[in-house]
């Protein structure tokens, strides 16, 4: 988890806690140790980045010195961090409880300036997070007093994958909705260069015939026009030079007697006429 330092800030209360010393460069490896401890309920304080002022450095020294136990994620980066090294050596000087965690096969206790009798756990020999957790929990110096309320950790990677799945499902639903609306006639894209017909009856019939767009090709090749009512402006049929037949509901002729001028065959639903 890349942003765990922001999401799980160091414990700043007054109840017993442990100090977890690690270099910022080792935050990914340190998280593998810290996560099961937080899930168990350990109160953990750690320093995040270099101290920005003398007062902050003093506060960190006081905070690290007040811990029940100091865990040290012992790497080359930690040995090179002056603030971490200073805090750890002060704790050693006053015989506070220290526990070294060795992530690889290099024991750096002497490099850090620690005595070789400081307890040392070779993490590279522990294959699982549970084994690491048990090794720390049962180590000499670990106090049950530092246990508080367990923290539920949400895995960012899993959350990201679920978000991606939901986004994909949303995109699929949007596409299906678009195609469904188009099929039902609720959404029909209209090209800007389509031919213009002012009569709503003729315009609607042409869009039904073309599935939306009234193109020049449609106007030049359409042979059959199916209307659902009598248009008010038959003259617009002159824009359809290939038109041969017009289909009308029989009831339409009962409402009005006007028929188009031209050599068209008129087909009525329920009968035919010319």
Image (cartoon, rainbow, N blue to C red):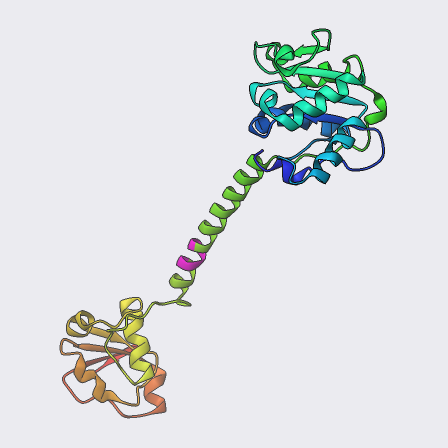
The quadrant of the picture occupied by the C terminus is bottom left
Residue 255 among those drawn in magenta:
no
Q: How far across and down, in percent of the image, does residue 101 sit?
A: 66, 16
Residue at the top extreme of this rendering: 117
Give the residue displayed 17% in from the left and 77% down from the top: 243
Residue at the bottom extreme of this rendering: 257
182 is higher (above) or lower (below) than 232: above
Q: Which residues are magenta?
A: 175-179
Residue 38 lies in quadrant: top right
Q: How far across and down, in percent of the image, does residue 106 sit?
A: 57, 10
> Between 36 and 99, which is closer to the camera in this rendering?
99
Residue 177 among those drawn in magenta:
yes
19 is higher (above) or lower (below) than 230: above
User: Does the rendering let one see residue 274?
Assistant: no
> Between 262 and 91, which is closer to the camera in this rendering?
91
* Lateral position of residue 30 relative to residue 170, left or right: right
Residue 67 lies in quadrant: top right
> Between 196 and 249, which is closer to the camera in this rendering?
196
Give the residue displayed 40% in from the left and 67% down from the top: 187
Q: How many marks?
A: 0
178 is higher (above) or lower (below) than 158: below
* Lateral position of residue 157 relative to residue 148, left or right: left
Q: How far across and down, in percent of the image, does residue 84 sit?
A: 66, 26
């Amino acid at each position: 988890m890349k942003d765990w330092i922001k999401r799980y800030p160091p414990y700043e209360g007054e109840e017993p806690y442990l100090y977890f010393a690690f270099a910022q460069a080792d935050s990914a490896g340190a998280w593998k140790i810290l996560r099961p401890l937080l899930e168990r309920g350990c109160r953990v304080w750690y320093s995040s980045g270099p101290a920005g002022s003398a007062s902050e450095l003093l506060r960190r020294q006081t905070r690290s010195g007040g811990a029940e136990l100091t865990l040290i994620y012992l790497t080359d980066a930690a040995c090179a961090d002056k603030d971490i090294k200073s805090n750890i050596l002060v704790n050693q000087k006053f015989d506070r409880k220290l526990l070294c965690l060795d992530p690889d096969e290099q024991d750096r206790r002497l490099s850090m300036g620690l005595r070789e009798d400081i307890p040392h756990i070779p993490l590279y020999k522990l294959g699982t997070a549970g084994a690491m957790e048990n090794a720390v929990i049962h180590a000499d110096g670990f106090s049950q007093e530092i246990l508080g309320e367990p923290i539920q950790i949400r895995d960012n990677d899993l959350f990201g994958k679920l978000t991606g799945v939901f986004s994909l499902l949303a995109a699929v639903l949007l596409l299906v909705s678009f195609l469904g609306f188009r099929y039902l006639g609720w959404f029909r894209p209209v090209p800007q260069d389509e031919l213009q017909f002012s009569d709503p009856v003729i315009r609607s019939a042409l869009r039904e015939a073309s599935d939306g767009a009234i193109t020049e090709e449609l106007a030049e090749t359409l042979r059959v026009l199916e209307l659902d009512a009598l248009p008010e402006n038959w003259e617009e049929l002159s824009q359809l030079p290939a038109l041969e037949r017009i289909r009308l509901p029989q009831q339409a002729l009962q409402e009005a007697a006007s028929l188009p001028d031209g050599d068209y065959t008129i087909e009525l639903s329920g009968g035919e006429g010319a």
